[in-house]
Amino acid sequence: MTRAPSPPARDPVLLPEPPRDCRRCPRLVAFREVNAAAEPSWFNGPVPSFGSEDARLLIVGLAPGLRGANRTGRPFTGDYAGELLYGTLVELGLASGTYAADPGDGLTLEACMISNAVRCVPPANKPTPHEIEQCRGFLGARIASLSRLRVMLALGRIAHEQTLAALGLRKALFPFAHGARHELGPRLTLFDSYHCSRYNTNTGRLTADMFRRVMLEAQRCMTRDQGRGS
């Protein structure tokens, strides 16, 4: 019988969320300190995952945006990507409340969680391969902590590859493509979407309808699995 993948035990000290003063990536720490000096009221730290610990759906993005999550301290909060993501979650009943681009808006997620492949904002929104690797253990620990997890949605190629690496799976076996569905095991399915960034929507690479269709498929998969009592 095929067993569901589990994150490799590479660093047993890592928890699902990095410490507030995490210093694993010198370049990101230096950038964080520059931002903190310029904008001391901003969050300026590793942005924690947001959502339910009973999540059946985990959405994985790339990294915090400088004036988005790095400012507000909540994933996808404060920039355009959040408008599309949270608006779609509310529409599909996966979130309750009204998204107001503020972590104090009272928005709650229903059976889902949002995290990032890299938890600190990188310069020019581009983490290095070493920084991606350094943050991988936190994603692996976060995945392992969600006992009811059945579906994952990767927003962009880096999030897709980081998710596979965190699970100890070969990228070549699960190629990234918008709308792709990958059966990672009998109880875990991965869906792919282009990242819901303003750049992708402005260029037409991703439309709101394209994004909604992928989200809807992920929700249907999650709901079918729940209906089987697993």
Image: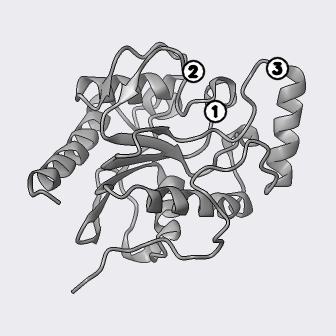
Disc 3 residue type (three-letter): Glu
Q: Residues within 10 Å of mark 1 (few under 14, many from 20)?
A: many
Q: Mark 3 or mark 1: name the one nearer the start of the chain.
A: 3
Helix, strand or loop status at disc 1? loop
Question: Within 10 angstroms of label 2, few (less than 14), some, or many (20 or more) residues?
Answer: many
Q: Nearer the viewer, residue 46 or 164?
A: 46
State if disc 1 and disc 2 touch (CB < 8 Å).
yes
What residue is rendered at 80% in x and 55% in y?
25
Q: Which residue is mark 3?
A: 39
Q: What percent of the width, then of the height, locates residue 77?
A: 54, 25
Position of residue 167 in the picture relative to residue 174 (left or right): right
Label 3, label 1: how many angstroms apart (C-alpha)? 14 Å
Q: Is residue 195 above or below residue 133?
A: above
Q: Which residue is mark 1?
A: 65
The residue at which mark 2 appears reads as: 78
Q: Residue at x 84, y 50 (%)?
A: 27
**Do labels 2 and 3 touch, CB within 8 Å?**
no
Q: CA distance from mark 2 to mark 1?
A: 9 Å
Q: Name the amino acid, label 2.
A: Gly
N-terminal-most mark, 2 or 3: 3
